[in-house]
Amino acid sequence: MNWMLATLVSAVFLGCYDLCIKHSVRDNAVLPVLFLSNTCSAAVWLALLAVQSIHPGILPASMNVPPLGWVQHGQLILKSLLVSASWTCSYFAVKHLPVSIASPIRATGPLWTFLGALAILTERPTLLELLGMTITLGAFFLLSLAGRGEGVHFHRDKWVGWLMAGTILAGLSGVYDKFLLGRCGFTASTVQAWFAIYMAVLFLPMAAGWKWRWWARNEFQWRWSIPLLSASLLVADFLYFSALHDPGALVSLVSSIRRGGTLVAFAGGVLLFGEKGSRQKLFAVLGILAGIVLTLVG
């Protein structure tokens, strides 16, 4: 598949992923959703690892997972801890916020990755990157004004705070991904496979605590969107890494186009969940995407 087409399809699946999160956690217990969706992803990779072990060389090179040492497993466990904290914050927030607001906030993740790279990896911003950052922050403020029409006050709504915490943690995870894939030499399939497996392990005790009522909690209802949540993320990530693997692919363009999944989530929130789709909110979403594009291209 052409890298541009792969990126566009990845963006669509990423938007579907946001919609599946909202459908699966709305009026539902969050921790079982997190555990079951990650278990689905882990099961897929465990099956692929089994195939690789029984029939070496049968899988495409892009899906091959080489053996790792204990230090390398520790590095991937650290990534899984970071993402599990991010997803816990984000899923609880998405449960209580309109997806047409939550998805644009989550789309600012590259901004926090960029800021983290400036602080941790001592990278220096270009003029375009600074302009993109300014536009993103301005659009974020516009989104906060649009949110007031739905009773979401960014400065005092705790779920916006949770979502921001989850988004910033995801940004830090992006910085760590650069370290793992760049400096440590991990392949994308290795990170994907062990990350999925360790995420299921990390969410197991939390799901057990929910099951045995260690705290007051909501009831759980199985929904078809839970396995679809897992499948949509697996497909989106696989297509994303496949696009990056193409020698002719432009990394900044791939990363920018992928954020277009926010438009899918925005439209789905309005059409499927009956959320308000004000013109001000749409302008804010487009502004965030434009700012992210400038930041990534710059």
Image (cartoon, rainbow, N blue to C red):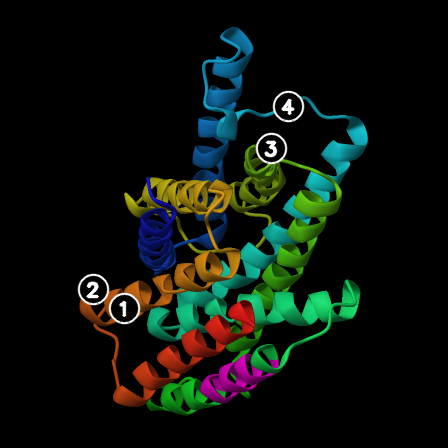
Secondary structure at numbered mark 2:
helix
Query: What residue did someone put label 3 on?
Result: 190
How much space separates mark 4 and mark 1, taking CA atoms?
40 Å
Magenta highlight range: 130-140
Callout 4 crowding tier (Cα within 10 Å): few <14, some 14–19, many ≥20:
few
Query: Picture quarter containing residue 239?
Result: top left
Callout 1 crowding tier (Cα within 10 Å): few <14, some 14–19, many ≥20:
many
Secondary structure at numbered mark 1:
helix
How much space separates mark 1 and mark 3, taking CA atoms?
34 Å
Callout 3 crowding tier (Cα within 10 Å): few <14, some 14–19, many ≥20:
many
Residue 54 drawn at (x, y percent): 51, 7
Secondary structure at numbered mark 3:
helix
* Image quadrant where one finds the N terminus: top left
Marks 3, 2: nearer the viewer: 3
Q: Is residue 60 above or below residue 284?
A: above
Instruction: Please identify the residue farthest to the top as the structure is shown.
Output: 54
Picture disc at residue 272: 2
Disc nearer the start of the sequence (4/1): 4
Amino acid tagged 1:
Gly
Relative to 38, 17 lies left or right: left
Nearer to me, 11 or 154: 11
Query: What residue did someone put label 4 on?
Result: 66
Query: Picture quarter containing residue 230?
Result: top left
Instruction: Tell me whether circle 2 and circle 1 mark residues in contact (CB < 8 Å).
Output: yes
Relative to 52, 22 lies left or right: left
Q: Residue at x 50, y 41 (%)?
A: 245
Query: What residue did someone put label 1 on?
Result: 269
Q: Main secondary structure of the magenta part?
A: helix
Disc nearer the start of the sequence (1/3): 3
Amino acid tagged 3:
Thr
Disc nearer the start of the sequence (2/4): 4
